[in-house]
Image: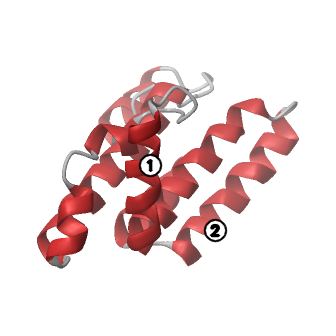
Amino acid sequence: MDMRGSYSSAVKEYLPTLAIVFDRYHITALTDKAIETLRREQQRTVDDTEKKALKGCRFLLLLKTTSFFAENHQTKLDTLLKINKPLFAMHSMKEQLRLLWTQPNHKLATAFLEQWCLDALVAGPKPLIKVGLTLLKHR
């Protein structure tokens, strides 16, 4: 389900016994939006060297996995993440969140998500903190 308040409010009102589940797509979309927000902030505030590294990296940051990257794409992403700590933190946390769906049961998944959210609050640039708070709110 979409995480917008209007959707969950309607479900709670009209289907009070139904369990609300936020799917992988919507959680991933939330992290992708946060990465894009942070990338744009960084684009406006960094020096010329970092701006060069940021140019053309939008989709490199958003892709699910780097295992299918061409060598030059992987090199570009690695360079960017080395010189930009906020994007490194955001990208690393996004990749870690993907492990949520590999948890073998509900109890471990819940513990993983709670720890991930706490880590996001500590590690975070603002967009990452926002993702952590949103996931905690909807947990």
Residue found at x 47% / y 36%: 71
**Residue 91, disc:** none
What SS does tag 2 mark? helix
Q: Nearer the viewer, residue 104 or 95?
A: 95
Q: Amino acid at mark 1?
A: Thr
- Position of residue 115 measured from the top left corner of the image (x, y, whole percent): 72, 61
Q: Nearer the viewer, mark 1 or mark 2?
A: 1
7 sits to left or right of 15: left
Q: Which residue is mark 1?
A: 75
Residue found at x 39% / y 29%: 2
Mark 1 or 2, nearer chain start: 1
User: How many marks can you see?
Assistant: 2
Residue found at x 85% / y 43%: 108
What SS does tag 1 mark? helix
Picture quarter with the N terminus: top left
Location of residue 51 by image quarter: bottom left
- Position of residue 58 measured from the top left corner of the image (x, y, whole percent): 27, 44
Above/below status of 3 relative to 124: above
- The CA span between labels 1 and 2 is 27 Å
41 sits to left or right of 97: left
Q: Crowding at label 1, few (<14), some or many (≥20) Cα neighbours within 10 Å?
A: few
- Position of residue 117 measured from the top left corner of the image (x, y, whole percent): 61, 61
Q: Which residue is mark 2?
A: 119
